[in-house]
Image (cartoon, coloured by chain):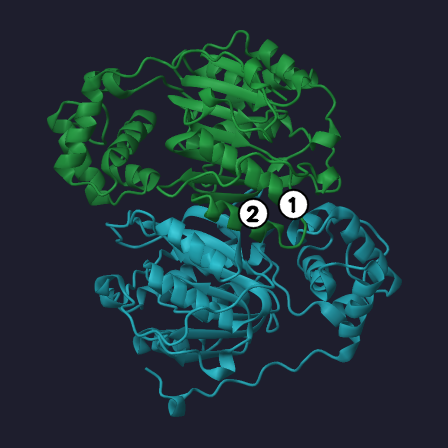
Chain colours: A green, B cyan
Amino acid sequence: MAEPSARPRLPEPLAEPSARPRRIVRDVAAAVGLAEGERGVDAVIATLARLEPVSIRRVSRATELPVPIVASVCGELRKRAVVAEERPARLTDAGRALFAHGELSLPSSAACRRCGGRSVVISDELHAVVRDVARLARAAPPPRLELDQCHCTVETKIRRVLALHAAGALVGKRVLLLGDDDLVSLAIASVVREFGSETTIARLVALDVDERILALVREGLAAAPFPWVCVEHDLRVRLPEELVGGFDTIVTDPPYTIPAVRLFLSRAAEALAGAGDVFLSFGSKRPGAARLAQQAITEHGLVIRSLTRDFNEYVGAGVIGGTSHLYHLTASEETRPLVGEFPGALYTADA
Amino acid sequence: MAEPSARPRLPEPLAEPSARPRRIVRDVAAAVGLAEGERGVDAVIATLARLEPVSIRRVSRATELPVPIVASVCGELRKRAVVAEERPARLTDAGRALFAHGELSLPSSAACRRCGGRSVVISDELHAVVRDVARLARAAPPPRLELDQCHCTVETKIRRVLALHAAGALVGKRVLLLGDDDLVSLAIASVVREFGSETTIARLVALDVDERILALVREGLAAAPFPWVCVEHDLRVRLPEELVGGFDTIVTDPPYTIPAVRLFLSRAAEALAGAGDVFLSFGSKRPGAARLAQQAITEHGLVIRSLTRDFNEYVGAGVIGGTSHLYHLTASEETRPLVGEFPGALYTADA
């Protein structure tokens, strides 16, 4: 358990973007009279950067903003030379320079064409990533069952990265892995090395209580093109101060007990920088567990954006049937942590 | 609005199954010491009937019961000659006669193979159904916008039926359509005519406030092979007594306001016979709407089993971006209606 004095030094956050893009966003939000404010404009721009060229309708779906609002935001951005005149919508070079922080040219076939892009698939173009991640996963230490470790399959690690990307929660984001025995950090690094650039990820922090995991992650991230750090920490203790409010995207696969879910959601809420996304895996089969987990999600002011059954597959997980579900949660104005210090039993073996 | 005196006559419920299967279920639940009780055994048997021959692991996923529990239930069912000795698991002829109420031999390719069955697709084998439903849909009256009618596409109507079937919420079930301007009843009838039998659906009730819709549904269901009835009713008034507690599966696409969602969920909770499934479409883009809808779901004691973004596509629905999300909800011990008589504004135009 990390003592305050042993708090890891974290890399300095990336330099804040210059004032100009922020002013543009503020002006556009005001010109449109957007209820969602600057966040809404940010979402439109981020979606343009990720999907361009892209139809207004598709931006509307991705941002959950009505079509006329998106059209109006794009109109204002055109006046400011951030969005180009052509259709479908795209950024200008100047707009890209101001707003597109890093990129990731994934094969477009990551979205499942057969079922209308409602799920992600690992296309053949990802074979180098699969090989790479499989090699790293083979080096993983055996799961410590008393910590509820249970490694997900190589395919699942990669599909999680694709799901993050498909949700707009990867490129340009500050990503926190709240526990990483699944080695999602290494899958992110592999995908970025193959298809991205050094600015694809603004910052990645892998936090775990198990030093064996962190040693492996450190080794695997050594050549990662983006800023990263590993933090040894027991989540029963509050987050190191440097992590509070510092992230856009949180990924976590906590022990499948309700106290653990509440604890991890609270730590996620602390770590989020206002808006942001939480990818929570959960698959307890105890009666009532799903209802209580969803109650915890609601009470934390988090919103379920999607819930995909059996998204995660695990190696040798007989009793839980080998799968769990992926919740994509987003923060709202009401998002807040509910658990402080946590003295209780955390793992299923303690329950 | 239907007066109590004008309450429609409903067909008699199907005869209760004989006492023997119920006794078997009770004995197996007791022998296994199942926390979920008879419901758990029912779920295992229904899954066997739907998917046989099927692995224990797949039954575990579908029922959310741990693998050893499913194995043990199947063991007890084998002793009673309901499940056959062979693997993967399947019913005996005697078991089928006792428990398999109707069937539906859909092309297996309804589950999307490319993304691991995580979504449903309309395979070529369904072309007759697509043609049939498209023909019926062309006869639909123009949407009454003041009732928030907004017809979903033919593909969506059929994919809803496939999603119901994939979730085990169609075969042998009593199905209630809480509002049916989407004509899902006709898509169900078409799929059953093509691939099912007269016992595939135990009973279907289409309820709507709009007599024009009901006239069309009545015409389309005239040749349906299962028991059905159309009910004209304004959901602001409580359900006709004969509908209370009478259904296993509810399908609804209410107006996208929070009061309407609360109202429709309350009516769904009233209509459910204890356990059961609710398929709710919702896609409001107002800020906070998703959070409030999920709060309403939790407060009604319903559990989100899956949430598929942009599952529903609509004809000419410019402003909402042409899509909404499909929530698959299941009832819990805590499920209860929260709204009684409803005097307020229901439709988005009134809000």
Q: Chain of mark 2?
A: A
Q: Residues within 10 Å of mark 2 (few under 14, many from 20)?
A: many
Q: Amino acid at mark 2?
A: Ala
Q: With B78 as the anchor, is B312 left or right in this view?
A: left
| Residue at horizontal 56 percent and vertical 53 percent from the top | A291
| Quadrant position of the C terminus of chain A in the picture | top right
Q: CA distance from mark 1 to mark 2?
A: 9 Å
Q: Amino acid at mark 1?
A: Ser
Q: Residues within 10 Å of mark 1 (few under 14, many from 20)?
A: many
Are the residues flagged by discs 1 and 2 from a single subunit? yes
Q: Which residue is mark 2?
A: A293
- Give me the disc on residue B271: none
Q: Quadrant of residue A29?
A: top left
Q: Are marks 1 and 2 in contact (CB under 8 Å)?
A: yes
Farthest residue, direction top: A223
| Residue at horizontal 57 percent and vertical 54 percent from the top | B166
Q: Which residue is mark 1?
A: A284
Indicate which disc, 1 or 2, sits on the residue closer to the N terminus.
1
- Mark in the foreground, 1 or 2: 2
Give the percent coordinates (x, y) of residue B41: 74, 62
Give the percent coordinates (x, y) of residue A135: 65, 15
| Residue at horizontal 53 percent and vertical 24 percent from the top | A124
Give the percent coordinates (x, y) of residue B99: 73, 69
Q: Nearer the viewer, residue B23 or B142?
A: B23
